[in-house]
Image (cartoon, rainbow, N blue to C red):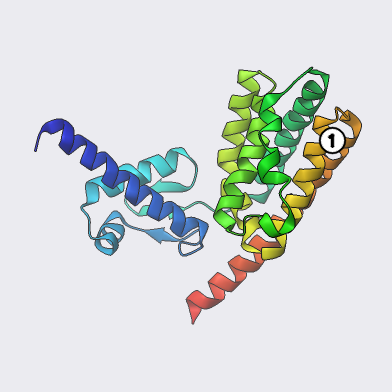
Amino acid sequence: MTKPTQAASREKLTDRIYQQIKQDIFDFRLLPGDRFSENEVAARLAVSRTPVREALTQLQREGYVTVLFRSGWQVNPLDFEQFDQLYDVRLVLELAAVKKLCEMESVPELTALKSFWLAKPDERAQDEQRVCQADEEFHQIMVAATGNREMARIHQDITERLRILRRIDFTQPRRLDITYEEHAQILRALLGKRVDRASTLLKAHIEASKAEVRKITIHRLHTARTRSRV
């Protein structure tokens, strides 16, 4: 095996471990505040410590875990105050994007969203992960379509940091249809250049999602902690 092939294989293994630990955090198999060691993760995944450490270092950079001096690692607690602040910044960016888009003559990127978000009820996707990804893309495309790369970069960073909460929003089946309806209304308002209507709909959409996510998260945390004690 050549060295480049070995490096690629190592990178693939690290990414697999990274994705698995991140999924464990998203699904509350690793709870906020839980402590664990590299050895424990390595044993559970049947891998060596080195790629585990590399994966955890990446998760640390993204704010999911913290390394403890001589005590292993810890899943970072959920900071709802910080999340509220991130939602506030996100709303400011997206409202600015709405205003800009409604002033533009043509926005082809928004037209491309019609096939997904304006689908008939019986043609809508029902897979929560697909709708979650499409939800992120809807808001990212909306901001990126303004042509302001710095705004898009900041928005992307906020999206990453809120992902653990926003993903929870789609664990409830009714939230899928609600997201479809709200996105369709926002999209129609944007395509019609109705800035006030689009802004009002967008603000209500983000604030409702934030409130729902907090409620679901607290409930799931309580359930997960109760289950872990049994």
Give the answer, above or below, for where 134 lies relative to 127: above
Give the answer, above or below, for where 15 lies relative to 92: below
Q: Residue at x 62, y 26 (%)?
A: 152
| Quadrant in the picture for residue 157 | top right
Report if residue 170 is visible in the image. Answer: yes
Report if residue 206 is visible in the image. Answer: no
Give SS at disc 1.
helix
Q: Nearer the viewer, residue 212 or 76?
A: 212
How many numbered discs sit on the rendered protein?
1
Where is residue 223 shown, x and y percent of the image? 59, 73
Q: Residue at x 63, y 50 (%)?
A: 166
Instruction: Say whether residue 45 is left or right of residue 63.
Output: left
Instruction: Provide the residue designation for mark 1.
Output: 189
Quadrant, the N terminus = top left
| Quadrant in the picture for residue 161 | top right
Where is residue 224 shown, x and y percent of the image? 54, 70
Instruction: Say whether residue 213 is left or right of residue 204.
Output: left
Q: Residue at x 81, y 37 (%)?
A: 188
Give the answer, above or below, for where 60 lies relative to 167: above
Where is residue 85 shown, x and y percent of the image? 70, 40
Instruction: Say whether residue 225 is left or right of residue 110.
Output: left
**Residue situated furthest left in the rendering:** 1
Q: Nearer the viewer, residue 47 or 184?
A: 184
Where is residue 160 shown, x and y percent of the image? 55, 40
Alpha-carbon neighbours of circle 1 within 10 Å: few (<14), some, or many (≥20)?
A: many
Q: Residue at x 91, y 32 (%)?
A: 196
Q: Identify residue type, mark 1.
A: Ala
Give the answer, above or below, for where 100 lies relative to 18: above
